[in-house]
Image (cartoon, helix red, strand yellow):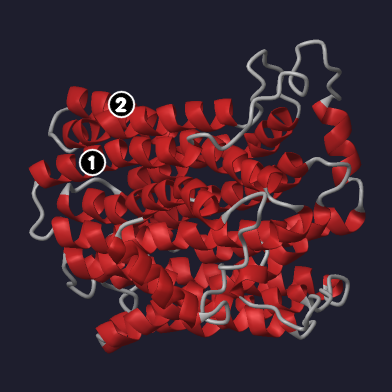
Amino acid sequence: MTPAGRRLSAVWSLVGTKFLPFADAGSDRLPLPQLLRLSLFQVSVGMAMALLVGTLNRVMIVELGISAALVATMVALPILFAPLRALIGFRSDHHRSVLGWRRVPYIWFGTLMQFGGFAFMPFALLVLSTEGDWHRFAGTTAGALAFLLVGAGLQTTQTAGLALATDLAREEDRPRVVALMYVMLLIGMLLSSVVFAFVLEPFSEFRLIQVIQGAAALTMALNLVALWKQEARDPSRTRPDRPRPRFTEAWRAFASRGRTRRFLLAVGLGTAAFAMQDVVLEPYGGQVLNLGVASTTQLTALAAGGALAAFALAARLLGRGYDPLRLAAYGAVVGLPAFAAVALAAPLDSAGLFRLGTVLIGFGGGLFAVGSLTTAMGLDDAGHVGLALGAWGAVQATAAGVAIALGGVIRDVVALAVDSGLAGPVLSGPSVGYAAVYLVELLLVLATIAIVGPLVGQGRVARPAGGRFGLAEMPG
């Protein structure tokens, strides 16, 4: 270690684990440097999510002039692969290979798909924005393929990567390890959204190409570093003649418990409630409040900051034995004033209220995510780590994709009705279509609270040994 590195390590050692909540996530079996290196795959996934859901949807709608319905459909295309996450996790649990790896092949091929999708995506979008029927057909086809490849890649990488992290950690360290992985996802979204905002101001098509292809190269680099010498080869564990249970039987046993099905329904509705506005949030700020590309791209960072604040509060509550499902319900309740604030920002012409609503959306979504994820960790049984994580991820991602697509469609349909005069003289202006989306989200939030209600009290978490529950103890 260099002299500067030794001095930095000495300073951090004086801070203590109270202010370094993930310092105790490492162990002799999985040292913290190795764990942090493994978590880089979550940074790449967060970067891809910030680019697809945050930056590209605003650029495609406002700068490139593509319809919101088409943009929402493309942004939602990666979610078509989401229902397969449970199968991916299950297959990685029982992968057969003479090389002795279970998780690495899935992470590697997921990385290749992410890279391939990002590599030609900007050119497809530029062709799509060009006038002419042939250009629109070719651009739509190529753009859809690019979004689908990126989505399939990040779904595969994240599912197998989280399962690998769980494999490498000791059983008592797994909640802290998975929590670190989830927070690294948000950090990846936060940092990348700030960088995208900086490099895309002022906007140009050449810069768009540089940003997307730079994300492709960085994804490959981060995931290669993350994978290097992580999973030990064990051919006896993956030998071709090893018996493997059927997925349908494993899934039937997993989903047969009534509480599991109701819980997954609540996760789907709550996720849809907080995800529907993803595709319209930045266009709303740009088209209605006249915010620039840099200002609207920073909204992703504001939402991520609100989510991190929610994690800190949730850690304290869960440390006192608070019911995680009640916490999830409170997160949904926070969504009520959050969506109302964003909807009212247009008639009040208040960018500050718009940003406040964005932070509250991140905060409420963070509380809901922590509560549901804490409960989801108890769904694992019979050693099917990949299946349990994949089931939660499949429901969440599928609900998010459907909600994102519906958000764009609702906005376009209502805007068309307003422009044609069908909505009447009172409802006029571009903000009406966006307000309709937030009204639907309010209804979904109320439905989520109703579904979660009967489950409250069944998922209480015991206080950890030693009387401490920091950010590191949050399952993710």
Whether 408 is drawn above or below 318: the answer is above
Whether 230 is drawn above or below 305: the answer is above
Residue 104 x %, y %: 57, 30
Marks 1 and 2, the one that precedes in the sequence: 2
Examine the image and state in which quarter residue 176 appears.
bottom right
Q: Which amino acid does label 1 sit on?
A: Gly
Q: What residue type is labelled 2?
A: Ala
Q: To which residue does mark 2 refer? A: 142
Residue 183 x %, y %: 51, 63
Examine the image and state in which quarter residue 318 appears.
bottom right
Whether 92 is drawn above or below 404: the answer is above
Residue 364 x %, y %: 55, 76
Asked whether residue 423 appears in the rendered view, the answer is: no
Q: To which residue does mark 1 refer? A: 214
Neighbour tally class for label 1: few under 14, some 14-19, many 20 plus, Cα within 10 Å: some
Q: In this view, does 283 lie to the left or right of 308?
A: left
The mark lying in front, picked from 1 and 2, is 1
Q: Is residue 312 left or right of residue 357?
A: right
Residue under the image location 21 percent in, 34 percent down: 128
Q: Judging from the image, what secondary structure is the residue with disc 1 in?
A: helix
Residue under the image location 21 percent in, 70 percent down: 295
Residue under the image location 76 percent in, 73 percent down: 325
Q: Quadrant of the N terminus?
A: bottom left
Q: In which quarter of the image is the C terminus?
A: bottom right
- Distance CA(mark 1)–CA(mark 2): 19 Å
Residue 317 x %, y %: 69, 84
Neighbour tally class for label 2: few under 14, some 14-19, many 20 plus, Cα within 10 Å: many
Examine the image and state in which quarter residue 369 appears.
bottom right
